[in-house]
Image: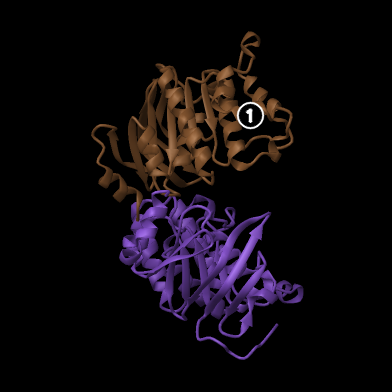
């Protein structure tokens, strides 16, 4: 693991990142930074590079060029997915992937940060500390009332919150959340806004979303990607009024 | 001809369509507009039978097709040109076109001439593999393949996406030609407003899985459409 001297105050630092697949430039000299404690919304039309950007940050895809630094001192381009996850970058994919046959609280317990090697796991004991942690997370994601229900019986929104809870159990510094409110009811969407705001009190959050009502409610800085680089950045109103953004959304 | 009555669509527990209603008539182009992720493709998948609806109904020429599988819908005249075109890369252009025979009776199995008059480039490439065509040519092939089926209802999912301007013009001309024949109802999903504006007879704009604006060509309020499409 590289420990270069800290070069930036940003928690996430991308500079001139490019990625090509079979001649298609998914990321084209992409640069942006996310400050510690920030919540950032990423928007952009299809093919803008949102997913590839998250793939690069989590080590799923390697950049062809450019720098990706985490916490000022970790060069993510030299680390694999596991090392990056252990550094404290958690990712929530769009589709909920919880263990449907396990209860809500068991899902959280399985995700708790800890030593997962064979001996430790075999001789695992329930400690008060772990139970407290599970209770805290269930409170945050507001699933305490249904903690003994099997996850398969949860609503779509509840499943998404449970998976966010599983991410929290890993105690990440940075959460990457991909389209959390797609398919949610209006009430669930509102609840997700509150949940992410609460999580953001302690952790940095990057959320990719198409739902502009939701992005507006979040009320955070917005980065609009297009063709693999940043097209506009600012408040949602600034971005929405940007003429180039308007043109792109009208397909011109 | 096509009547979509308040359909809902779910992926597992996630809801992608919320009470969507839509009409398409022969000789008319119905445009479905909206940003990415608002449910446009889910709507076309529901019409083609690729995804089951959880509520509401779909009728084609008066008969209920809500529960029919995709091949039965194809037999009844629904042709789908999906996003990403989905031509067969290892089959030749001619073989790709002939896959459109599948729902047809034996005596109807010929490639209509207008496929080549609309897309002359295809006639010179019949022996070439689909995968070797450019993106624009593949798009023309995908539309050609749909026309081989003699559709009554043609579903087009963002036919201009990633296509160069000259071929966008060809595709626009082809859609206008098909509309003017008066036999085919076209549902055109687009994010390219100017393209849709020129061709559309009806407009529906989607957001969050629902239709938030609908109008005929004559009464369309372009500013309202832009507001619904932009962020």
Q: Residue at x 27, y 43 (%)?
A: B222
Q: Residue A219's image quarter?
A: bottom left
**Residue B84 visible in the shown view:** yes
Give the secondary structure at mark 1: helix
Pointer 1: residues within 10 angstroms few (<14), some, or many (20+)? Answer: many
Above or below residue A251? Residue A35 is: below
Nearer-the-camera pick, A132 or A26: A26
Residue A178 placement (x, y as % from top left) = 50, 60
What colour do you see for chain B? brown
Q: Residue at x 43, y 27 (%)?
A: B176
Q: Which residue is drawn at 43% across and 77% down?
A: A38
Residue furthest right as drawn: A119
Above or below residue A91? Residue B169 is: above
- The quadrant of the image that shows the N terminus of chain B is top left
What colour do you see for chain A? purple
Residue B26 placement (x, y as % from top left) = 40, 20
Q: Which residue is drawn at 56% across and 82% down?
A: A71
Residue B60 placement (x, y as % from top left) = 43, 20
Nearer-the-camera pick, A37 or A145: A37
Residue A35 placement (x, y as % from top left) = 46, 80
Image label count: 1
In the drawing, does residue B73 fall left or right of residue B192?
right
The way the protein has been coloured in the rendering is: by chain
Residue furthest top as drawn: B107
Check the residue under mark 1 and report the chain it is in: B
In the drawing, does residue A46 fall left or right of residue B2?
right
Q: Mark 1 points at which residue?
A: B122
Above or below residue A156? Residue B52 is: above
**Residue A170 visible in the shown view:** no
- The quadrant of the image that shows the C terminus of chain B is bottom left
């Amino acid at each position: 693991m590289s420990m270069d001297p800290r070069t930036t105050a940003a928690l996430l630092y991308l500079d001139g990142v490019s990625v090509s697949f079979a001649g298609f430039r998914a990321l084209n000299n992409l640069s942006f930074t996310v400050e510690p404690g920030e919540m950032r919304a990423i928007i952009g039309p299809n093919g803008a590079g949102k997913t590839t950007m998250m793939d690069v940050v989590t080590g799923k895809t390697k950049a062809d060029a450019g720098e990706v630094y985490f916490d000022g001192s970790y060069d993510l381009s030299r680390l694999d997915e596991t090392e990056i996850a252990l550094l404290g970058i958690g990712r929530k994919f769009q589709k909920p992937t919880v263990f449907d046959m396990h209860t809500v609280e068991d899902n959280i317990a399985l995700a708790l940060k800890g030593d997962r090697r064979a001996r430790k796991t075999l001789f695992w004991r329930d400690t008060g500390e772990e139970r407290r942690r599970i209770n805290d997370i269930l409170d945050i994601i507001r699933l305490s009332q249904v903690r003994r229900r099997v996850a398969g019986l949860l609503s779509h929104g509840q499943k998404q919150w449970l998976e966010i809870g599983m991410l929290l159990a890993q105690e990440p510094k940075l959460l990457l959340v991909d389209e959390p409110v797609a398919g949610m009811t209006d009430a669930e969407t509102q609840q997700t806004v509150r949940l992410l705001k609460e999580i953001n009190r302690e952790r940095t959050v990057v959320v990719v979303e198409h739902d502009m009502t939701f992005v507006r409610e979040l009320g955070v800085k917005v980065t609009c990607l297009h063709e693999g680089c940043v097209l506009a950045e600012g408040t949602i109103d600034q971005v929405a009024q940007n003429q180039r953004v308007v043109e792109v959304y009208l397909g011109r | 001809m096509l009547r979509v009555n308040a359909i809902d669509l779910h992926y597992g527990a996630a809801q992608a369509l919320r009470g969507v209603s839509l009409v398409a008539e022969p000789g008319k182009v119905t445009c479905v507009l909206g940003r990415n992720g608002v449910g446009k493709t889910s709507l076309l998948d529901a019409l083609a039978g690729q995804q089951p609806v959880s509520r509401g109904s779909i009728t084609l020429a008066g008969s209920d097709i809500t529960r029919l599988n995709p091949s039965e819908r194809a037999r009844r005249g629904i042709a789908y040109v999906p996003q990403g075109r989905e031509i067969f890369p290892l089959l030749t252009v001619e073989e790709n076109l002939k896959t459109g025979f599948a729902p047809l009776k034996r005596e109807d199995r010929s490639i209509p001439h207008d496929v080549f008059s609309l897309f002359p480039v295809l006639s010179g490439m019949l022996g070439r593999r689909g995968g070797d065509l450019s993106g624009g040519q593949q798009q023309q092939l995908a539309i050609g393949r749909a026309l081989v089926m003699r559709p009554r209802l043609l579903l087009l999912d963002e036919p201009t996406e990633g296509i160069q301007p000259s071929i966008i013009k060809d595709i626009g001309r082809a859609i206008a030609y098909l509309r003017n024949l008066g036999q085919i109802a076209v549902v055109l999903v687009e994010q390219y407003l100017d393209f849709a504006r020129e061709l559309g007879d009806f407009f529906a704009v989607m957001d969050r899985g629902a239709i938030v604006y609908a109008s005929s060509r004559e009464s369309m309020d372009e500013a309202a459409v832009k507001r619904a499409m932009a962020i």
